[in-house]
Amino acid sequence: MAGRTRIMRAREWAYPVPPVRREVLSAQPEADEGRPPVLFVPGFGHGAWAFAEFWLGHTAARGFPAYAMSLRGHGASGSAPHTTLRAYVHDVVQVAAGLPRQAVLVGHGAGALVVAKALARYPARAGVLAAPVLGGFGSFAAALWRNPLGTIPAVFGGPLRLGRRQLFSRELPAETARQYTSRLGRAAPLAQWQLLAHRPAEAPVGAPPVLVVGSPDDRVVSVSTLQRTAARYGGAPLLFPGMGHDLMLDARWREPIDAILDWLEKAFAATERSPLIGYERLDDLLPPVRPADPGAWVA
Amino acid sequence: MSETISPPSLWRDGRPVYDRGGTVCVIGAGASGLAAIKNLKEHGFGVDCYERETGVGGAWNWRHDRSPVYASTHLISSKPLTQYPDFPMPDTWPDYPHHSQLLSYLERYADHFDLRSHIWFGTEVVRVEPVEGGRWDVTTRGARGGAERTQRYAAVVVANGHNWWPKTPAYEGQEQFRGEVVHASAYSDPAQLRGRKVLVVGAGNTGCDLAVEAAQQAAKCWHSTRRGYWYTPKYVMGRPADQVNDLTLALRLPLRLRQWLFHRVLRMTVGDLSRFGLPRPDHKVYETHPIVNSQLIYYLGHGRITPVPDVARFTRTGVELTDGSTIDPDLVLLATGYLPRFEFLAPEILNLDADGRPRLHMHTFSRTHPTIAVAGLLQPDSGLFTLVHWQTVAIARWLRLRESDPQRAAAFWNAVASSPDRRWTQAKVKDSTRHWFEVGHTVYLRALQKTLDELEVAA
């Protein structure tokens, strides 16, 4: 992905983002197999609960330490009515850097935009953009067309509302869908406006592999958007037909998360045999405790 | 275990040399060395790091004999201007964390990015010698002795720090002085001051901290400074002072205007320091390394610190000052700074002058040897970690570019080899060993941004 890394960050130095209490839920695998932790970042209106339903436990069951967070003003995180995208990015980087090992960032919806920006500030092991809402006037026009009643209030600082039929497929029982939508909150008005116009995400630091997943039947993000987003990261999207926007809550939630975890397993298997290293790593040959004299262990 | 390592095929002076292929050697696992390991790793290099102490953290690890920190050391730059740009300090930490938090930050950094598996602890680098093909023979041995061992590396990043070799002035008559003379590096605990008559020499940040500690603990405290300085409080206008200062930098206000503003703010908050008996500064603000201390003025106001001029000579029972007066301390603390040391390298490689000052391109790249670089040899007006992060990214990109695009690499190298020395500060700083590596973080980072863009490897 193009775009150089800007190292002059005057605003971040002069006006650091104010701290806030953050909700982080986690599920740990039974045995630590040394796999990287996976951090789920929900989109606007959603909280950590959206991942706690299914994906968190499933990810842990497959051997990855799993974490889900709520951006400020969402879920059980501290309130932040006047916040911006920058603060959301700060929240993600703070949580990621607080994990014991280098993490994989998984962002959903507008949370994918937050993750895309966080990837430029934290060298993640990998990035996953699920049904990414990267904003811009195109997606605004599409939202206005598909969901005028939910979108117009947001123009005036009201909440951006997504309908049941946009978020979920018909496979999900209406009662369950209603329960989920009743739990939705809202993002700060400034952050919602920033979806329209914001500086595009800088290139990720540390060149992590990035995967885009989505559904051709998503009524928030179109297939062409998915393809364009994936192409920016040099790939093609993984598509799950018949699912709504909320991949993690829809009836067939298992398919996308399994695909993501399969991809992660494959990506890490590849880097472990990276030709760039090309040399047996010294530490593979050594006992965990080193003798003080490096000469001592070579006969 | 040993059979998996191929027998050495190279020899040097009758001793075997183990070839480490394209691996890069990093010397030191302090803040700079850790950033070097991480960023080299991120650019696909194999890395071996040698650390003579038994843990990471370098200067910030108070367990190390050579660590300069004392019990009360706190940061003097606030969090956003101190942390690595890609690994922020926790929001729950204060604006100016304690040194023990810094150590735990560095330890977490090492664990988070799995850096420890690259580090040979308790291993000292004895010699680093260039060999043909731009490669390096690095000879190491256990820090407590043991057999030497030589390995050949593709490149070397020197990150051995510059705050561990005390710069100790020699005063006339010092040997007959009956009191104790100690360099600040040997000071760690305020109990060392309790009930004593203490003279603190030097107005660096350490000197001012020690004067404050002595004001709190000692029976009497003199603070000797050579000239008048500008003492910046940790907070101005309700915010960390460096963040306010960075606002004026972000707005790209001209230096003169910033100096005027800074003088105004200091006059309104701290006031005229000559009232306390301190000499007036003989220079404008920004022309010496910033001193950040809110408490020094406070204790001067309480009369707990007596400012005195420079030390002229020691006598048997006391110290004679340049104004002719004498004082009778029983403990003299020399907060006179540190000097860089590169004992393992031939002086011409880093272009060391007679005083031992290296002359490097951007304080980083050797002008004669393309595959050796120094990380963290900077004295910024902010925290170091941000700078050393991008500095080591530049080193990693440079080493990558040499492999992937020799033509562009050659162009960059020509520019490095012929580059003149320049200063990386807006104001012209006073000539002193303390300002050898003085950089303004914005000036330096803007230049680094240019270098990084030049070195960007097209994907």
Image (cartoon, rainbow, N blue to C red):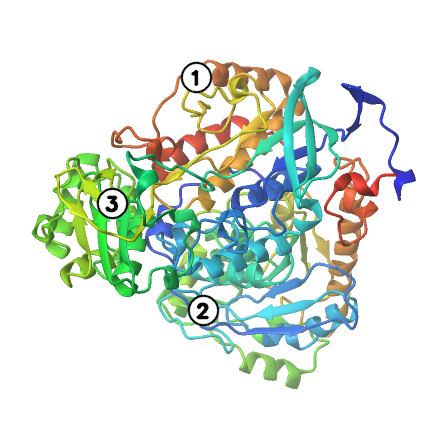
Residue at point 24%, 55% (across, down): B233
Does residue B399 appear in the picture of this structure?
yes
Q: Callout 1: helix, strand or loop?
A: loop
How much space separates mark 2 and mark 1, taking CA atoms? 51 Å
Which callout, 2 or 3, points to the residue nearer the camera? 3
Q: In the figure, B216 relative to B20: above or below?
A: below
Q: Disc 2 marks which residue?
A: A187
Q: Callout 2, which amino acid?
A: Ala
Question: Do dots 1 and 3 share one subunit?
Answer: yes
Which callout, 2 or 1, points to the residue nearer the camera? 1
Farthest bottom residue? A175
Report which quarter residue B145 is drawn in: top right
Left-right relation of A115 to A30: left
Does residue B241 appear in the picture of this structure?
no
Left-right relation of A245 to A19: right
Graded by Cα atoms within 10 Å as few (under 14), some (14 to 19) or many (20 or more), the crowding at tag 3 reads some
Q: Nearer the viewer, residue B105 or B280?
A: B280
The earlier-in-sequence mark between 1 and 3 is 3
How much space separates mark 2 and mark 3, taking CA atoms? 32 Å
Residue B248 is tagged as: 3
Q: Position of residue A141 (x, y in %)?
A: 48, 56
How much space separates mark 1 and mark 3, taking CA atoms? 30 Å
Question: Do dots 2 and 1 share one subunit?
Answer: no
Question: Do dots 2 and 3 share one subunit?
Answer: no
Chain letter behind tag 3: B
Report which quarter residue B445 is drawn in: top left
Q: Callout 1, which amino acid?
A: Ser
